[in-house]
Amino acid sequence: MNSLRRALAVAGLAAASVVLLAACATSAGSGGAPFGSLPPAPPEGEVRGTGTVMDVGGDVQLCLGPIAESLPPQCSGIPLEGWTWEGVDGSESSGGAQWGAYAVQGTYDGEMMSVTGPPILLALYDPIRPEDPTGGRPGTADEATLEKIQAELPDRLGDQLLSSRLESGYVWVDVVWDDGTLQDAADAAYGDGVVIVWSALRG
């Protein structure tokens, strides 16, 4: 191989390497993962969640999403470890189930919440309201676009999704936990200011 051909070959390999590295950086970056495909890292330290604690035969869960209005109520939540009804007021019972609405403090490993302190009856709980991420400004996406995005959410988020709604020009998405991973992926998929991800567990 003469010097010219060797130089061209080296230049070609260098260019290919740059393209490959750029592609890897795009796929690995926060905006490269499809919305919902990369779960958030579990929170560091304690978090607090508000909802219905449902105990059916010793299987205790904290339901952060919708509750079926039956007797006893029905819901699907995150398992609670270390829960006790001893000294806890405000519960009801029926059909082998016991339940009540509380603010629960604990650590969350991405699947289960371990209780670290006494619960607070939700009727007495007065938290500081989180800041509105929209700043009170209405969104600009059209209704058809928002409805299409909302229809995709169950497939994209699976068990992470608690509920969703269209409000003030946004798709509001309630999830169990987000450290910013889901919001960044939503912004990359749909553009900034279209989907607002709201975490039910908060530090």
Image (spheres, helix red, strand yellow):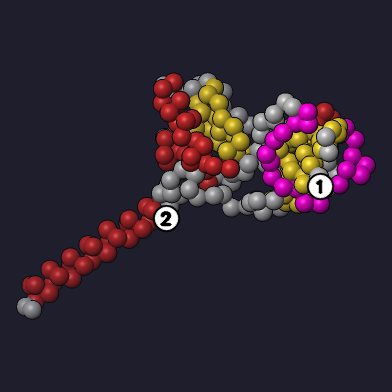
At horizontal 46% and vertical 25% (from top left) the residue drawn is: 147
**Is residue 153 found inside the magenta-colored segment of the image?**
no
Magenta stretch: residue 72 in it? yes
Task: Identify the disc placed on residue 58.
Answer: 1
Q: Residue furthest bottom?
A: 1
Q: Total label count?
A: 2
Q: Real-space Cα distance between discs 1 and 2?
A: 42 Å
Characterize the local packing of mark 1: few (<14), some (14-19) or many (20 or more) Cα atoms within 10 angstroms: few
Q: Which residue is mark 2?
A: 28
The disc at residue 124 is none
- In the rendered structure, the answer to whether residue 169 lies left or right of residue 201 reads left
Question: For numbered disc 1, what is the local secondary structure?
Answer: loop
| Residue 46 visible in rendering | no
> Residue drawn at (41%, 49%), measured in percent from left and top?
32
Estimate the x, y position of residue 63 in percent, counting from the top left.
71, 38
Please state which of residues 169 and 157 is positioned toward the viewer in this rendering: 157
- Taking the spot 83% from the left edge, 38% from the top edge, the residue there is 96
Q: Give the magenta range.
A: 71-91
Decide: is 116 above or below 144. below
Percent across and percent down for residue 126 are: 79, 30
